[in-house]
């Protein structure tokens, strides 16, 4: 039986709709921004607006990027909520969670969180949540921040790069983990060991291999071992940020088998780039932990496929062009961070299809799994009762990255000139197309989503 005319606000029909059961010919009915019907194609759902997908288009759920540095307020010349969320939407990302640094102030107090919310409120084109920060001396701020809706807490185990966000040592991290365990929050960790890096070669100059030697895998491995053991001892939930060292995969797999409450992410730059191909002085490639060798990259893909690594997020960490020291190309001086918020889906899909990995798996790593990490129970899937966040994706269309056409604020990315497969043609937030002119994003709070 077909519905009355205009039964839904929006109906989307297509041969390739990525549902929780995989790609299928379906009709999707949306009312009040929520997916309320998913039926076989041909059932004749009617809506005030009907979109028929083209033969080369796939409807996919909006991606969830839980690792984005928006840097507003305080370093808004690096990025900002308007530019970052425009870039997200252009890349099919409908929810981001903002890191507690490099804004000024950092999100280490309720006041710092409120300052961010005030500036984000009227300029977000996608939904935005916030991580809190765990730094020395703010243990008493953790519960109030949690109660104010942050999704968890980030700490560093070495200098963060900015002085207003100091790092914890492993014992301090354990103390904070105990505190977070008491209200079931999550500790997300930049896991590189400061002592190992202090003893590594100095990174000066324009040779990438010198910089790579200054951030050895051992520094990552040692810090990840600390996170695992402190999570084991405290029972707290812990998450390893931006895994780049494949050496750590066996101990991560072992910890998961032991029941340690551990999740792990990696990023497009570790899965698509390799140290052997980075030119001298090409500081657009600098990030910490660093892009490693091709053999390491292959093992990270294996870790994703066997479930040791849970999800893929951008770690969009922008800066101004001058901070990248482009004139000298000195890897010691340049700001470390890769800008890729808009490109993640195409980057990973381009690489995945060469490996025979289906689009459904890519979307799971970039939508469903990050949503689960942040406990966003109505995001990351095309399913009944979920927010109608999705994009129309053309997986076979190709394009060449042009840094001057990207939406993020500063025109630098290591992917400039790179040919990629997969174009996001349109992105919708709660059933409404994101136009880049009228900000419709909501500020998300833990527990209210």
Image: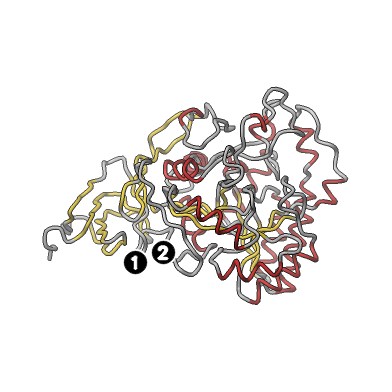
- The residue that appears at 57% across and 33% down in the rendered structure is 413
Pointer 2: what residue? 378
Q: Position of residue 287 (x, y in %)?
A: 67, 40
Question: Helix, strand, or loop for circle 1?
Answer: loop
Pick whichever, 25 or 68, lies toward us.
68
Residue 135 appears anywhere in the view:
yes
The C terminus: image quadrant: bottom left
The N terminus: image quadrant: bottom left
Whole-angstrom CA distance, mark 1 to mark 2, is 7 Å
Tag 1 near tag 2, CB within 8 Å: yes
Sequence-first tag of 1 and 2? 2
Pick whichever, 69 or 220, lies toward us.
69
Q: Is residue 421 above or below residue 94?
A: above
- The residue that appears at 49% across and 60% down in the rendered structure is 371
Quadrant in which residue 41 is drawn: bottom left
Q: Position of residue 50 (x, y in %)?
A: 20, 50
Q: Is residue 205 above or below residue 121?
A: above
Residue 359 appears anywhere in the view:
no
Determine the residue located farthest toward the bottom in the rendered image.
182
Q: Position of residue 250 (x, y in %)?
A: 70, 58
Label drawn at residue 385: 1
Question: Helix, strand, or loop for circle 2?
Answer: loop
Relative placement, left or right, of 6 versus 204 is left
Q: Position of residue 375 (x, y in %)?
A: 51, 66
């Amino acid at each position: 039986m077909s519905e009355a005319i205009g039964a839904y606000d929006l109906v989307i029909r297509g041969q390739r709709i990525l549902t929780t059961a995989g790609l299928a010919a379906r009709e999707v009915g949306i009312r009040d921004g929520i997916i309320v019907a998913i039926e076989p194609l041909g059932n004749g759902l009617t809506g005030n607006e009907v979109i028929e997908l083209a033969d080369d288009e796939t409807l996919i759920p909006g991606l969830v990027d839980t690792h984005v540095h928006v840097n507003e307020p305080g370093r808004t010349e690096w990025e900002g909520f308007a530019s970052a969320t425009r870039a997200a939407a252009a890349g099919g990302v409908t929810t981001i969670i903002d890191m507690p640094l490099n804004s000024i102030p950092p999100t280490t107090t309720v006041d710092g969180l409120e300052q961010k919310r005030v500036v984000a409120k009227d300029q977000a084109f996608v939904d935005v949540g916030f991580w809190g920060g765990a730094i020395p001396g703010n243990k008493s701020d953790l519960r109030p921040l949690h109660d104010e809706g942050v999704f968890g807490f980030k700490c560093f185990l070495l200098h963060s790069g900015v002085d207003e966000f100091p790092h914890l040592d492993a014992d301090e991290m354990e103390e904070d983990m105990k505190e977070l365990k008491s209200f079931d929050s999550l500790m997300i960790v930049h896991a590189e060991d400061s002592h190992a890096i202090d003893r590594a070669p100095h990174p000066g100059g324009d040779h990438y291999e010198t910089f790579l030697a200054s951030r050895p895998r051992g520094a990552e491995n040692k810090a990840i071992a600390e996170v695992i053991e402190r999570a084991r001892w405290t029972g707290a939930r812990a998450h390893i940020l931006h895994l780049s060292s494949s050496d750590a995969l066996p101990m991560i797999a072992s910890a998961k088998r032991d029941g340690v409450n551990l999740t792990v992410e990696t990023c497009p730059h570790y899965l698509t780039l390799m140290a052997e191909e980075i030119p001298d002085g090409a500081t657009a490639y600098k990030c910490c932990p660093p892009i490693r060798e091709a053999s390491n990259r292959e093992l990270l893909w294996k870790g994703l496929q066997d479930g040791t690594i849970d999800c893929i997020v951008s770690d969009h960490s922008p800066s101004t062009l001058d901070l990248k020291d482009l004139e000298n190309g000195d890897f010691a001086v340049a700001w470390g961070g890769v800008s890729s918020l808009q490109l993640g889906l195409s980057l990973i899909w381009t690489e995945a299809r060469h490996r025979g990995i289906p689009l459904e798996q890519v979307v799971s790593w970039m939508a469903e799994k990050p949503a689960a990490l942040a406990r966003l129970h109505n995001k990351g899937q095309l399913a009944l009762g979920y927010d109608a966040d999705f994009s129309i994706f053309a997986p076979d269309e190709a394009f060449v990255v042009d840094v001057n056409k990207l939406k993020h604020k500063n025109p630098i990315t290591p992917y400039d000139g790179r040919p990629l497969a997969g174009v996001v043609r349109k992105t919708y937030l709660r059933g409404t197309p994101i136009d880049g002119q009228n900000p419709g994003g909501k500020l998300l709070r833990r527990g209210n989503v």
